[in-house]
Amino acid sequence: MRITGRTRPRSPAFAANRWLLTRSSRPLSVVDKLPPVEVADAAESDQLDDAEDRLRLYTYLTAREARRTHFAIMRLFSSTLMADLSAIDVSSALAVAEREGRIDPGEAAIDKVLDRLRQLTEWRNLLPGRRETNARSIAEFHHGSVRYQVNKLALRIHRDAEAVLGIPLGAREVSREMLPAIQRGLEIIRRIAVDSFAAESVNASDTAAQTRLREQLSEQVTTLFLQHGELAATVRDFYAYVGQVVARHDLNPEEIAGLRGLLVEYIQLVIDDVLRFTAAITVALSKLQSVLPAVLRLLAPTADLGESTERARGRAQSDWQGLADWFISRPGKVSQVDALRDATSKAIGSLLANVKRSTGGAGVSPGHRGELLRLAQRFDVSTVETAHILYAEAFGLWPARHWNLAPDADDTLPTAAWGEGAKTRVTVSVSSPGDRSARRVSKIAEDPIGEQLALRESERLASEREAAWAELRAASARLEEVTLSAGALVIFYDLLRRALSQLDPAKGTSQFTLTPARLRVRVHSRPGKTVSVRAESGRLTLADVGVQLLVLG
């Protein structure tokens, strides 16, 4: 027997045949007992305006029963475009997953599959429908005629869930290379928009050129917002990881050292790049603001797609406002760039607090982590009697002891109360380390960003100083023939000043040695002699004196 199912209303003859078949002596299967599935209206199924309906789409990820089966079914529907699967198709695919151990045994049975599909339909993850099918029995007709499609929002949820399963637990690298690309993209968009206006004003009938410019503009806008989305996502993920790590109280010295390198070195690179390109991006955004309405007009859809259509980013005024808010602060809203700096300061401050806490030894927490672990190991291998002794040694409370010498004579009667006995003078130091009383001490505000900038500036000055020393060592034999840099001249002048300040008029000679630079300046009184040293910033002339610049071995 071959039965054909259709989407049109069933005829009375077909209903009668089905009633006669189900009344036969053959036992009814589980599928035969199921009520007919009503075809949902597609437009109504796609409209999940209620927040509760949207949140219900996440239920299958945390369901207590058959969570792995629900996930495997959603993975099956998300693995292809326009998936249109029946219960038989799903059961066949789940059989492979069951053999591989990815779902529980028995979950690929057709009755279990129907239950799981019905549950996903109630949660609105799947949408049921019917289509024509060829069947050899009533059960096969039920299995094949009811088809399921995945909901658009459910597809996006499952795509994000699959991505979460593959994300490493470590820090995510920030896509700093997107910053110069965003700057160039804004400049290109403005240039294409100006060219489009010029093409419209010169030759409005040249639709081919205008279409080509619109396509270029659309390409650049889409690329720009994809780049910004990648930058924003990597920044959020990176700082989320930093936040969860610096909040831990059980960091060991190795983890603290690694985190210190991450914060001091890598975050500084991120901050430097963001601050360097933010000014240029702000200028580009301000220049684009005048032509933005025309850009949105050029990006308007050529066909009527309806108000409910989700368009690519950059086609609405709110998208550009969000892009500007990421880089530029405005009244009542702090930009993400400023928030980035604040988050960095908080992260470095938390790191410093963790370092103090783990090395300070105050309190029984991070400073005694290693000791507590060793104590736990000793408890684990000790007997009951040994454990009691070990506990008393580690946590027992002992009476107070007086470490001063006893008085020469103590006439206190044994029956006297302690408050009535002899007194011993004890010198109390107000600056004792054990004194925890509150004091009016001025708080020093920590500025981690300022500290790092000062360190950078110090490193730069040290590098310039080393370069000037090397230049003087190279020019020591021909000091009057070369042209010194401004930094080298400053150091040479300082060496001369120190040597001349030690000049002995009787001997007519003096010298000064700068050991870190391996340089020595020797000055001699030479009436009538003139020494002239050229530099980029001017010329130094010395009269009645001879100068020697020596390099130490």
Image (cartoon, rainbow, N blue to C red):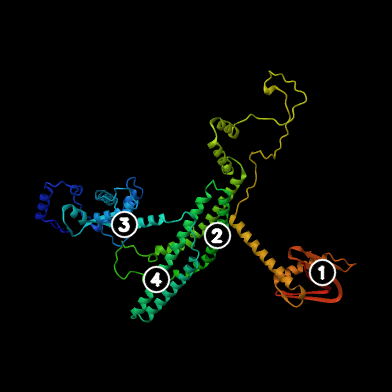
For residue 522, the mark is: 1
Q: Earlier in the sequence, mark 2 or mark 3?
A: 3
- Total marks placed: 4
Q: Nearer the viewer, mark 3 or mark 1?
A: 3
Residue located at (66% from left, 38% from top):
435
Pointers 4 and 3 in contact (CB under 8 A)? no
Mark 1: give few (<14), some (14-19) or many (20+) Cα within 10 Å: some
Pointers 2 and 3 in contact (CB under 8 A)? no
Q: CA distance from mark 1 to mark 4?
A: 70 Å
For residue 76, the mark is: 3
Q: CA distance from mark 3 to mark 1?
A: 86 Å
Q: Residue beneath label 2, please?
A: 266
Badge 4 marks a residue whose secondary structure is helix
Q: Earlier in the sequence, mark 1 or mark 4?
A: 4
Q: Earlier in the sequence, mark 3 or mark 1?
A: 3
Q: Residue beneath label 4, please?
A: 219
Badge 2 marks a residue whose secondary structure is helix
Query: Three-letter amino acid code at disc 4?
Result: Glu
Q: Is residue 404 left or right of residue 12?
A: right
In the figure, 476 relative to 120: above or below?
below
Query: Three-letter amino acid code at disc 1?
Result: Arg
